Image (spheres, coloured by chain):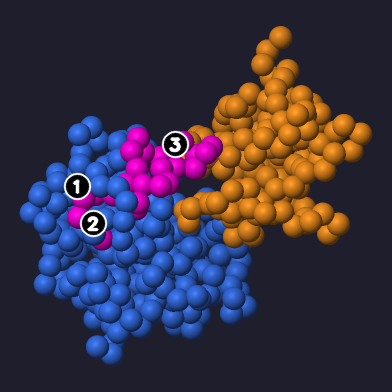
Amino acid sequence: MTAYAHPEVLVDTEWVAQHLNDPQVRLVESDEDALLYETGHIPGAVKVDWFTTLQHPVRRDFLTKEEFETLCSSLGIANDTTVVFYGDKSNWFAVYAFWLFEYYGHQDRRVMNGGRAKWVSEGRMLTTTPLAYPPTTYHATGPAKDIRAFRDDVMRHLESHQPLVDVRSTKEYTGELLHMPGYPQEGAQRGGHIPGAVSIPWSQAVQEDGTFKSPAALRDLYQAHGITPDKDTIAYCRIGERSSHTWFVLKYLLGYPKVRNYDGSWTEWGNLVGAPIEKGEGA
Amino acid sequence: MTDSNSLPARLEEIVNDFEVCEGREKLEMLLDYARSFPPFPGYLQRPDEMEEVPECMTPVQMAAEVKDGALYYYFLVPEESPTVRGYAALMMEGLKGSTPEQVLAIPADFYLRMGLQHVLTAQRLNGMAAILAHVKRRAATELN
């Protein structure tokens, strides 16, 4: 295997630099940090925030389809716009946004390989100039239920011994780490992992510079743990952002046809009364 | 007496500043603190991380010095984490010269009055809670 299965979903920083003034392209910055965009962003890029823009303001859920349409309209994104996502932390939240745009049927989605850090490390330009685009009329489709898993899907999955990938750090997987002192709101009542899940921390899919590993290295990484393209796979982490990264790798870089992201992840499972949990090294 | 009286005077002023401004202005103010984040003093030994930080979270390092019984805190926070830099910068400023007793008397939820939870979400205040827990832990060591 010498090429990614769907190489068109990745663009490099040079491609972005060449398309800064392309009206067909909309750059979207999606960061973990709520204020990073404001300290400087790629010229022309708009901001989405995984918490305050992509999630429903009241329920624990994503925007509704109608709210998603309003969001796209306000960002000047039309149905045929090429949307290029990038962000901090090796594109965690960029891919999370990519996943949501797929959920509501946006066709042309790309990720800038290496994310914001690579753009900055190459000394490329950032700006704080505010910008606004004329609103569009946007029609969402979906939701694409085949990319999202809910807790009942996960329960069936584990009962039928189908593959689950836990992409959190090793200590979160073993249950040694529940949450950090002072961070109780992001924790769960119980530590450990979903029984049968294999541990493949998300970060093993990226290189030092934040770009994705080679196709061969990625294939070896997942296949060594029994995560193969013939199976129906569900990935999870703590809140669903790191696992959207792994979902992206499996679906687009390795071409696995059936991969879902369990966005409820550990902050749901570890709080569910009666849910089965395994501690320690596991599978 | 309201419980706001239990904040050090400068921290009380900062909390009030946030309290009276609205929505986007609160974020602008936090961003201003992030931009004014002071360099770590060269004469202080570079501190260890406050504790092991799992990958989702921003690594924060803290040191403190005591002059005439008053505390001065210093932080190291990565540049790509302006939200946490903002928290650290306002705490550095707000606690400058406080006594350990004053620091320990700060209510654990003092920052809710600033209203940042309405523009950042409650989860993003975890960094503030963690910083407060650490400055208190350091203050407690002065009294032992």
Residue located beneath label 3 in the image:
A185
Label 2 marks a residue whose chain is A
Look at the image and say whether residue A7 sits in the magenta stretch: no
The amino acid type found where label 2 is placed reads Ala
Label 3 marks a residue whose chain is A
User: For residue A186, what is the image quadrant?
Assistant: top left
The outermost residue toward the top is B1
Q: Which chain is orange?
A: B
Q: A268 left or right of B55?
A: left
Q: Which chain is blue?
A: A
Q: Position of residue A167 (x, y in %)?
A: 33, 59
Residue located beneath label 1 in the image:
A150
Q: Position of residue B126 (x, y in %)?
A: 53, 40
Q: Position of residue A227 (x, y in %)?
A: 20, 69
What is the spatial separation of the Cα atoms under label 3 and label 1, in whole angstroms? 21 Å
Above/below status of B140 relative to A24: above
What is the spatial separation of the Cα atoms under label 3 and label 2, in whole angstroms? 24 Å
Q: Residue at (81%, 29%) from the top-left corner?
A: B99
Above/below status of A200 relative to A178: below
Above/below status of B43 relative to B89: below
Q: Nearer the viewer, mark 1 or mark 2?
A: 2
Quadrant location, the C terminus of chain A: bottom left
Residue located beneath label 2 in the image:
A197
- The magenta-colored residue range is A173-198
